[in-house]
Image (tube, grey):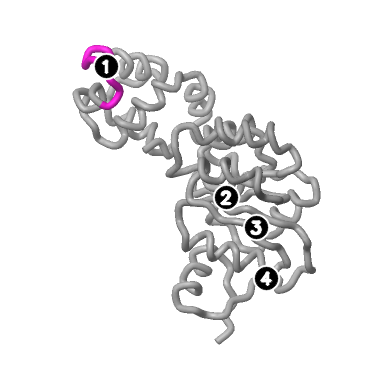
Amino acid sequence: MVKIKTSLSQLFLAQMENDIFVTQSGQSGMSDKKVILMDVSSLLRTGIQGLLAEHGYQTAAQFPTIETMHSALPMLHADLIIMEHLQQSPEVFSHLMQIRKDYPDIQVLILSSSSSDFHIQLSRRAGAAGYINKNSSLDKIITTVNRITSGGYCYGPELWHHHARYPRDASLLLSLSHIDICILRYISAGYSNKIIASMLNMNNKKVSAYKQRIMAKFKITRLAELVDLAKRNYLY
């Protein structure tokens, strides 16, 4: 049975049910471009591979982590990397920046569940040519892929909704140190100061001092506000 799929979630269901799927635009011409996929979800990678194949793109390789992808790049040839930065190591953007430096001919598209302005700005700084949310339509995803593989740059206007609602988040988060961000992630995950101290090999008082400094920078007074800050920026 042929069904029209318009979103990644519908595409995943089709993969699970072994349905034949097409997008609304159908075939959009063949391409000799090769793509590398990086996401912790094998189901998502398989779904995107099918979508790309429908539009003539070849998947050169798939990886669950940026570390495994980075180490394999010398043995691969590709025109584009499509990757998700969430559920990766804290060094994901450092890896991305190094990849763009070492392989300038390989463009990068971030396909993410996060629309946090913080992550969008980190992606820009690391050299990604585009950023699109996983809730976007399949046609929009393919249009973005086509634009980037043609040498374009794509950060759509819909990405600025988070910035409009929380205009200070990105600039303040970008001013935090690596250890600040780690502590913020652990607080969001519900860990106590004692556990955080143990994980970071420091004492409780130091963790408390970091926490108070972060709260002062954001001008918030309640722990619940700090947790909300972390969660709305996908820091967990």
Residue 205 shown in magenta:
yes
Q: In the shown orientation, is residue 211 left or right of residue 110?
A: left
Q: In the shown orientation, is residue 116 left or right of residue 235?
A: right
Mark 1 neighbour class, 10 Å CA radius: few under 14, some 14 to 19, many 20 or more: few
Q: Are marks 2 and 3 in contact (CB under 8 Å)?
A: no
Q: Amino acid at mark 1?
A: Met
In this rendered view, identify the residue nearer to me: 135 or 161: 135
Residue in view at x 41 percent, y 26 percent: 181
Q: CA distance from mark 4 to mark 1?
A: 52 Å
Placement of 52 over or under 85, stated as above or below: below
Q: Amino acid at mark 2?
A: Leu
Mark 4 or mark 1, whichever is nearer to me:
1
Residue in view at x 51 percent, y 38 percent: 116
Q: Mark 2 or mark 4: which comes first in sequence?
A: 4
The residue beneath circle 1 is 202
Q: In terms of secondary structure, where does tag 2 sit?
A: strand
Question: Residue 54 shows which numbered tag?
Answer: 4
Measured as percent of width and height from the top left, residue 212 is found at 31, 15
Q: CA distance from mark 2 to mark 4?
A: 18 Å
Question: Residue 60 shows which numbered tag?
Answer: 3
Q: Mark 4 or mark 1: which comes first in sequence?
A: 4
Placement of 227 over or under 208, stated as above or below: below
Mark 2 or mark 3, whichever is nearer to me:
3
Q: CA distance from mark 2 to mark 3?
A: 17 Å
Q: In terms of secondary structure, where does tag 1 sit?
A: loop
Mark 2 or mark 1, whichever is nearer to me:
1
The residue beneath circle 2 is 111
